[in-house]
Amino acid sequence: MKNIAVIGAGTMGNGIAHVFAQTNHKVNLIDVSEEALEKAKATIAKNLDRMIKKEKISETDKENTLNNIHTITDLAKGVSDSDLIIEAATENLELKLSIFQQIDKASKPDAILATNTSSISITKIASVTSRPDKVIGMHFMNPVPVMKLVEVIRGYATSDEVTEATMKKSKELGKIPTEVNDYPGFVANKILMPMINEAIITLHEGVAGVEEIDTVMKLGMAHPMGPLQLADFIGLDVCLSILKVLHDGFGNAKYAPCPLLVNMVTAGKLGVKSGEGFYSWGHGTKDLIVADNFKK
């Protein structure tokens, strides 16, 4: 699997394209927006410059990585010769189902179709394709070039061969894949999101302030980032979306999103991406968070 297609040029998509291109894969980075694609290439170049400064790669490595990435707006053309296609679009079920229907028709019959979803059922996504045995979850962590974990999620019909190939490919990227089964939120977000939600409830109830809550979790629980700061980094809209999936999937009140989170998302306070969430974020602050908290 040397020909890779990544659908979506946002934070996760450009990070996934980066790690594949840096490990000598040919990558088609696909998005409907030319502007998004240009921004993605600029972000990847900036991240590679940061790695050069840390003496982790050379200028030649940077050039080779960028040359391995081809940007394209035509989805059908972008996936036609790909061995592995990874969807990294917005966490929206209807959008993902539409994309998978399209790539199922446009790609090679033996191509593996993967989704970077952080909570949506792999089985549900696979059900709209003609090859549910070749559909799998590859949940990368943000920032993708730095974080080692890849949650590999088997749908109900995912074959052993596809799972093994995906695990192997993840290791080739220098990642540590962990196989999990298809339940709402999988492992990472089934555990993480209730914790973030509880931190928001603690703030909502007036038990403590934002910095106090984060300080307790950082110093008392050895977390590199407090839950409210992490929520800002993930995106409060993404947190809300995942909690809704958990609540709908399990029907348990413990997954019900805190009203404060709902109100903040409604008001457009989404965290780093909007400039304001539980914290205020100035220009360039997101890069500082990555450098400070993931520098090892």
Image (cartoon, rainbow, N blue to C red):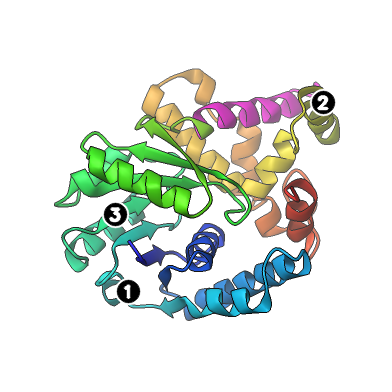
Q: Crowding at label 2, few (<14), some or many (≥20) Cα neighbours within 10 Å?
A: few
In the rendered image, which quarter is residue 194 located in? top right
The front one of 127 and 173 is: 173
Mark 3 residue type: Leu
Residue 80 visible in the picture:
yes
In reply to whether residue 288 is colored magenta, the answer given is no
Q: Quadrant of the N terminus?
A: bottom left
Mark 2, secondary structure of its residue: helix
Q: Tell whether label 2 touches label 3 (CB within 8 Å).
A: no
Residue ID for mark 2? 216
The answer to which of 240 and 259 lies nearer the viewer is: 240
In the rendered image, which quarter is residue 231 located in?
top right
First in sequence, mark 1 or 3: give its number: 1
Q: Residue at x 34, y 52 (%)?
A: 114
Q: Which secondary structure class fits the magenta region best? A: helix
Amino acid type of the residue that numbered disc 2 sits on in the rendered structure: Val
Residue 259's label in the rendered image is none
Q: Place residue 200 in its image quadrant.
A: top right
- Foreground pick, 279 / 73: 73
Say which mark, if any, is on residue 78: 1
Q: CA–CA distance between discs 2 and 1?
A: 47 Å
